[in-house]
Image (spheres, rainbow, N blue to C red):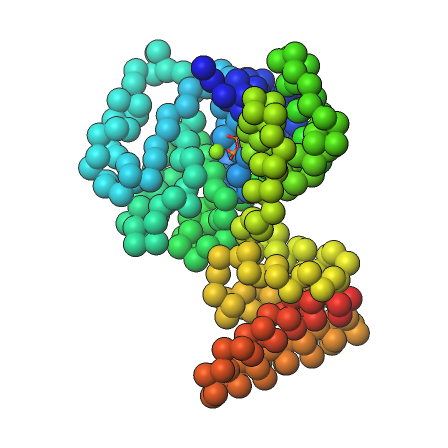
């Protein structure tokens, strides 16, 4: 039996919650293919509709999906073998095709070859290529980013999540405590798949303790982390933001440095640079004294400090 998350995966575009902008961009990419870029990356946290959008869109425009995974990409000859029947199909019987590389960040760091295979596939492909990723901003995907239009997906809002959960409960003729329903909607942090999984487990077991598993912080990509620091109200909790980003602090510093002048100006920018100077100061101290405790300060100025400058 299918789990609820699968059972309620939208088949049609208009059943997808949120993601309007992203959907429009995907559609225009496919309908105008080949345009400036021959590939796109749908980027965002897990459980927000990336894979769903691709499949629903292919139904809508009557295309066929051909899926490649990270291990196909590792080996050029096996990939070509897999692609051959697709590429050689008689035009007469030809249906439009979309090549999907789902979860492209699954190409591991040691697999440089995989990324460059994908890049050359994009260059030669007659068909549009759609990649999905949880964090497209990692170093190893940088050659791929240059070839792709990047489309960011948003986390699903608690009220949208609640709407989907209510629809499912109604359909399944089940009920749960309204307070628990609210909690699932909020604590799933925009991840609709995990919210649906949680709902299914709770309504089966009648347990609400399970909600606690959401308490551990989720990974965040550098893009969302910067947005949080630059745009949201400064709060002390922000100090833990970069703990959630899977990137060395020195690289995070570079991202911040580069983007700061694009979002701040005048006195704000000046204040933010002062914070960066402090980061540098502590970096030097850490280096000279090998005293890692100073990392805490580095992190503090880089997150809360920068945020509070505005
Ligand atoms: N935007 C959305 N609208 C409706 N359902 C969604 C949406 N995003 C996720 N879901 C639900 O979560 C499940 C997983 O979504 P999926 O598209 O596979 O996520 P991912 O972003 O990880 O690729 C779907 O089967 C569906 O039940
Ligand atoms: Mg997916």
Q: Residue at x 40, y 16 (%)?
A: 95
* Residue 267 visible in the current orientation: yes
Q: Quadrant of the C terminus?
A: bottom right
Q: In which quarter of the image is the N terminus?
A: top left
Looking at this view, name the residue that lies furthest to the left.
77
Residue 96, x across and y down, in percent: 43, 20
Q: Which residue is drawn at 74% across and 76% down?
A: 270
Q: Residue at x 50, y 30 (%)?
A: 51
| Image quadrant, ligand 1 | top right
In the image: residue 60, left or right of residue 144: right
Q: Is residue 172 above or below residue 224?
A: above
Q: In which quarter of the image is residue 165?
A: top right
Q: Nearer the viewer, residue 63 or 123?
A: 63
Q: Is residue 149 above or below residue 47?
A: below
Residue 247, x across and y down, in percent: 48, 61
Q: Which of 130 and 188 is in front in this view?
A: 188
Q: Residue at x 26, y 22 (%)?
A: 85
Q: Nearer the viewer, residue 199 or 275?
A: 199
In the image: residue 189, left or right of residue 271: left
In the image: residue 215, left or right of residue 128: right
Q: How many labels does the image show?
A: 0
Residue 235, x across and y down, in percent: 74, 62
Residue 147, x across and y down, in percent: 45, 46
* Residue 26 visible in the current orientation: no
């Amino acid at each position: 039996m299918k789990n609820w998350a699968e059972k309620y995966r939208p088949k049609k575009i208009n059943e997808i919650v949120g993601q309007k902008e992203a959907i429009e961009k995907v559609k225009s990419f496919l309908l105008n293919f080949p345009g400036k870029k021959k590939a796109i990356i749908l980027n965002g946290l897990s459980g927000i509709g990336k894979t769903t959008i691709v499949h629903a869109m292919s139904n809508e425009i009557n295309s066929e999906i051909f899926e490649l995974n990270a291990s196909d990409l590792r080996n050029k000859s096996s990939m070509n073998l897999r692609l051959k029947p697709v590429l050689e199909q008689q035009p007469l019987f030809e249906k439009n095709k979309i090549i999907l590389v789902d979860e492209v960040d699954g190409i591991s760091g040691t697999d440089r070859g995989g990324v460059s295979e994908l890049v050359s596939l994009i260059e030669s492909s007659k068909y549009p290529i759609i990649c999905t990723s949880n964090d497209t901003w990692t170093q190893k995907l940088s050659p791929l980013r240059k070839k792709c239009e990047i489309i960011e997906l948003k986390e699903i809002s608690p009220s949208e999540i609640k709407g989907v959960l209510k629809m499912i409960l109604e359909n399944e003729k089940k009920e749960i405590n309204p307070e628990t329903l609210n909690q699932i909607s909020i604590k799933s942090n925009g991840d609709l798949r995990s919210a649906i999984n949680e709902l299914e487990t709770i309504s089966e077991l009648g347990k609400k303790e399970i909600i606690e598993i959401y308490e551990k912080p989720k990974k965040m990509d550098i893009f969302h982390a910067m947005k949080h620091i630059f745009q949201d109200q400064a709060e002390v909790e922000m100090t833990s933001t970069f703990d959630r980003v899977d990137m060395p602090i020195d690289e995070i510093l570079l991202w911040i440095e580069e983007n700061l002048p694009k979002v701040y100006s005048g006195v704000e920018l000046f204040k933010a640079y002062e914070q960066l100077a402090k980061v540098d100061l502590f970096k030097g101290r850490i280096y000279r004294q090998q005293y890692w405790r100073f990392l805490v300060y580095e992190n503090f100025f880089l997150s809360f400090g920068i945020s509070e400058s505005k």
